[in-house]
Amino acid sequence: MLVIPAAGRGSRLGASVPKALVEVAGRPMIGWLIALYRPWVSGVVLVAHPTTRDAIRAAVQQYDLPSEVVIQAEPTGMLDAVLLGCVAAARWSPERIWITWCDQIAVHPDTVARLADSEGESSIALPLITRESPYIHFDRAADGRIAAVRQRREGHVMPARGDSDMGLFSLSARAAMVDLPAFAASATADAGTGERNFLPFIPVAATHGSVVTIPATDDIEAVGVNTPEELARVEAHLKSR
């Protein structure tokens, strides 16, 4: 199953439609995601804002893939959006739940295939890319285990070069349905944004399970479509690919 938090309204893009429905290279972002992940998932759960639920439901029903739309009534953060999506996905009894941000449409099919091949019995598997001036960086312990996550938007001190995710994660059924709710039960809002973030769950999961990382294919994969400039960059890349 694939969970897509899609409650964004696309305001920074100047869009008049929900962010997931903004067109990039002639196709809405949700269309790019379904085309990319269709070979690997049995269905999709989208987490939408109440005001955009109907538009997103109508859009996803155009694709031949079982789907469900659930509501995130308040913008409390990505942790809560992922949790809502996983609760809905659990009703399908999946072996694993994949999660992707709705604007990470430049992920390469080769990266997705490597993720599927590498996840095995891991609690979490995710692709990482080493890049300059990272927005996200995962710190490692001496044994190589992910020990902490730094986020630029939360005001953390960032390295000049770091290991960033690309908004794509594969969770075991236990990680998604047992460990994540347990983490969420005591998680607090981050000081910078006032939101509950999903990424701190990863180092916590690494303390009692296996977290597998794989290399990404291209730096562009870590670019989310949040601004007109990013949209233009990702659009040019997708057209060339």
Image: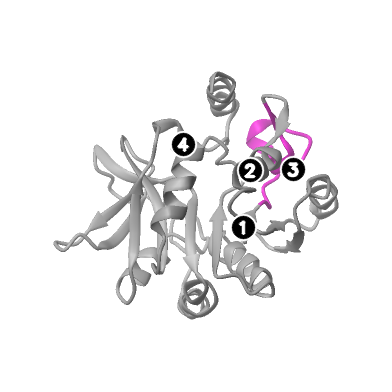
Which of pointers 4 and 3 lies earlier in the amino acid sequence? 3
Which of pointers 4 and 2 lies earlier in the amino acid sequence? 2
Which of pointers 2 and 1 lies earlier in the amino acid sequence? 1
- State yes or no: residue 7 in magenta: yes
Which of pointers 3 and 1 lies earlier in the amino acid sequence? 1
Q: Give the crowd class for mark 2: few <14, some 14-19, many >=20 residues within 10 Å.
A: many
Nearer the viewer's eye, disc 4 or disc 1? Answer: 1
Q: Which residue is mark 3?
A: 18
Q: In this orientation, which residue lies closer to the viewer: 144 or 185?
A: 144
Q: State how far apart marks 4 and 1 are (Cα).
A: 18 Å
- 185 versus 47 height, above or below: below
Q: Residue at x 66, y 41 (%)?
A: 35
Which residue range is magenta in the image?
6-24
Horizontal side of 241 relative to 12 (left or right) equals left
Q: Which residue is mark 4?
A: 221
- Of the numbered discs in the image, which one, if any, rests on residue 2? 1
Label 4 residue SS: helix
**Kind of residue at disc 4:** Glu
Q: Which residue is mark 2?
A: 33
Q: Residue at x 62, y 56 (%)?
A: 41
**Kind of residue at disc 1:** Leu
**Kind of residue at disc 2:** Leu
